[in-house]
Amino acid sequence: MTNLKNNRIPAQVKKIHLIAVCGTAMGALACMLKDMGFEVSGSDQQIYPPMSRFLAAKHIDVAIGFNAANIRDDIDLVVVGNAVSKDNPEVVAVLEKEHYFCSMPQAINTFAVGAKKPLLVVGTHGKTTTASLLAYVLYEAGLDPSFVIGGILPNFESNYRLGQGDYIVIEGDEYDTAFFDKGPKFLHYDPKIAILTGIEFDHADIFSDLTHVRRTFQSFLERMSAESLLLAFEGNANVAELIKGLDCRVETYGLDAEADWRVKMLNARLKLTSFEIYHDSRCLGTNHSSMAGEHNLLNTLAVFAAARHIGISDNTIASALTTFKGIKRRQEIRGQKRNITVIDDFAHHPTAVKETIRAVKPLYPQGRLIAVFEPRTNSSMRKVFQDIYPQVFGQADWVCIREPSRLDKIPADDRFSAKQLVCDLNKKSIKANYFADTDTIIAFLVKKAAPGDAILIMSNGGFDNIHEKLLKLL
């Protein structure tokens, strides 16, 4: 059995090494540690932007590839990324040399949280957007927050910030923590306020079914102290069931009149959504946001409620909502050529795909919405969503499905079929085409797209730089 006796953070730390440092959150942690005055190094299989740029700007030494030689004798602490196995040569060296080691959330909780009050956003969808907006509202209110978030905030051109204020905003992940800690990352935090955006089945590589997912969130909710506040989305049956009988304070938010906090859309146009917010049936006024879609209205509502509990005025919140620039890779317009708009979005779960299409479609009434989808996550490449994906593309005028590029990582009898999805969409009278690779998609779009069209590209990966290649050829 692996010896884990040194899985802790020592009292005196000067030099810290991060294994798999180019992950979004790991890179943010490395930069934060550097800002705090630690000597920081890291390693990863590949060095890629945007994290490679952030690390280089901080003069953090990053080794390409995992090698036992990267674990020097003078390192005080090693932070192990969640995708790193116990057989990794650097992990083997850490254990042989009996170095102290920890997981990413352990390090964040010790070095970044400390005495600060954590504001945690958890849930299957909307975590990044909600956490980002909350951090920005606190910043605009002059509260000088810290934050660690899984997406780049254009308002800061970063996914982390080390502030001097009392609050830190954290995107809480339900994914497992490390090879030595298979519990979810969010269990490492004790939030002052937590926002729960919803619970659905996802991460089929680590969760066996929805019951398993619910149990994981239940363990988090039951740990919340009586002094903490939970803002829970009331429009999700799984959430409604789990928030019964909790020790912490609970308030709900949503679209229905029964919710403690309610939002009502008034008007939706490109880069401007107008809406009203209600608390206990009392209208708090009209607000505006550049983010589109009902799902983003709900994210905004949760942030409004949390900010008000912190003591931020309605006027300050309203002002911040109008100047928030959104998140990179969330309905991000990458460019426009020949009056054809190319949009990038991180959507991959069926619900996220459906809501993103539903949000973008009304914004381009003069043309067609062409949805381009790359199934790339450990869940979307599995057949677990095979019968669900055909139900989510209904509002798109044309659908392009790419063959998953990493299917070899999935057992043959458990693989998702892109061809079957296209067949199922065609049976529903939805125009859909299958593509074996990215270049053929680009060639198709260059030929078929017309002025006024919007091309919505959805993937959680780089998608072979399809956005820039397409814009160049358009």
Image (cartoon, grey):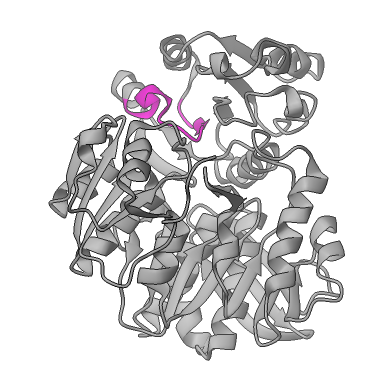
What is the quadrant of the N terminus in the image? Answer: top right
Question: Furthest-left residue in view?
Answer: 59
Q: Quadrant of residue 323?
A: bottom left
Magenta-drawn stretch contains 457: yes
Q: Is residue 24 visible?
A: yes
Magenta-drawn stretch contains 300: no
Residue at coordinates 48% horizontally, 14% vertically from top-left? 441
Task: Classify 247 as above or below 298.
Answer: below
Q: Quadrant of residue 76?
A: bottom left
Magenta range: 451-468
Task: Classify 119 as above or below 463.
Answer: below
Estimate the x, y position of residue 400 in percent, counting from the top left.
58, 19
Residue at coordinates 38% horizontally, 22% vertically from top-left? 464
Tally the marks: 0
What is the quadrant of the C terminus in the image? Answer: top left
Residue at coordinates 40% horizontally, 60% vertically from top-left? 325
Q: Is residue 402 left or right of residue 245?
A: left
Q: Is residue 324 visible?
A: no
Residue at coordinates 21% horizontally, 55% vertically from top-left? 40
Q: Nearer the viewer, residue 407 or 45?
A: 45
Estimate the x, y position of residue 432 in percent, counting from the top left.
66, 16
Q: Is residue 310 left or right of residue 421?
A: left
Task: Classify 470 as above or below 197.
Answer: above
Q: Nearer the viewer, residue 74 or 301?
A: 74
Estimate the x, y position of residue 303 in percent, counting from the top left.
57, 72
Estimate the x, y position of residue 48 in percent, counting from the top left.
28, 35
